């Protein structure tokens, strides 16, 4: 197994042990997280599905991100990532929602520099965890690193909530 295959397998294993499911809402990654989570065999036991809401309007219409928040802050904001995670969790009726939004480049967006990324996980009890990042590198590196950071955040949430600890 390559390094890029290990993290998704660990996430899926943690979900399966809890008999939990996850759904993803992706913007800048365009489906990379869903693809990573469906690569290991047995993914259907824990992966509910996903929404690629690349257009700002879809974030509101499909995921329930408040239109006033999008108008005020733009699509690249921590509260938008949190609302996307909550929205996809509800839409898919999953135990966890994982969402990413950000700027992969080559140009800034909504006044945010290239590499600005917001990741959020929504879980049981309406809890939301988030990670705000400023990544560097090429567009593809930013997208790939975002995928890894998102899966890492979800794995951390799953481990903390079960009492497990990573090395």
Image (spheres, grey):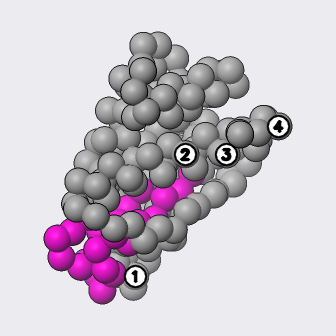
> How far apart in space, not on screen, are marks 4 and 1 (Cα)?
36 Å
Q: Which residue is mark 3?
A: 157
Q: Nearer the viewer, mark 4 or mark 1?
A: 4
Q: Which residue is mark 2?
A: 152
User: N-terminal of the two: label 2 or label 4?
Assistant: 2
Find out whether the residues at labels 2 and 1 contact each other: C-beta distance under 8 Å: no
Q: Residue at x 51, y 68 (%)?
A: 132
- Find the magenta span and give its range: 100-121
> In the figure, is residue 54 to the left or right of 91?
left
Helix, strand or loop for disc 4: loop
Above or below, comparing residue 123 to residue 83 in the picture: above
Mark 4 crowdedness (10 Å alpha carbons): few <14, some 14-19, many ≥20: few
In front of the other: 151 or 64: 151
Above or below, comparing residue 119 to residue 1 in the picture: below
Q: Residue furthest left?
A: 106
> How far apart in space, not on screen, are marks 2 and 4 (Cα)?
16 Å
User: N-terminal of the two: label 2 or label 1?
Assistant: 1
Q: Nearer the viewer, mark 2 or mark 1?
A: 2
Can residue 63 be seen?
no
Q: Which residue is mark 1?
A: 73
Can residue 38 be seen?
yes
Q: Which residue is mark 4?
A: 163
Helix, strand or loop for disc 3: helix
User: N-terminal of the two: label 3 or label 4?
Assistant: 3
User: N-terminal of the two: label 3 or label 2?
Assistant: 2
User: N-terminal of the two: label 4 or label 1?
Assistant: 1
Name the quarter where the C terminus is drawn.
top right
> How far apart in space, not on screen, are marks 2 and 1 (Cα)?
26 Å
Q: Nearer the viewer, mark 3 or mark 2?
A: 2
Whether residue 22 is in magenta: the answer is no
């Amino acid at each position: 197994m390559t390094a890029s295959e290990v993290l998704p397998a660990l996430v899926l294993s943690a979900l399966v042990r809890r008999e939990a499911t996850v759904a993803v809402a992706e913007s800048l990654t365009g489906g990379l997280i869903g693809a990573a989570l469906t690569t290991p065999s047995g993914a259907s036991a824990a992966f509910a599905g996903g929404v690629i809401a690349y257009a700002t309007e879809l974030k509101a219409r499909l995921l329930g991100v408040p239109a006033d928040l999008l108008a005020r802050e733009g699509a690249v904001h921590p509260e938008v990532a949190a609302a996307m995670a909550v929205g996809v969790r509800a839409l898919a009726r999953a135990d966890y929602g994982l969402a990413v939004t950000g700027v992969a480049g080559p140009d800034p967006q909504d006044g945010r520099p290239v590499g600005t990324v917001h990741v959020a996980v929504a879980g049981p009890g309406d809890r939301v965890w988030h990670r705000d990042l400023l990544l560097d590198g090429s567009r593809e590196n930013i997208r790939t690193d975002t995928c890894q950071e998102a899966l890492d955040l979800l794995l951390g949430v799953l481990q903390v909530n079960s009492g497990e600890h990573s090395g």
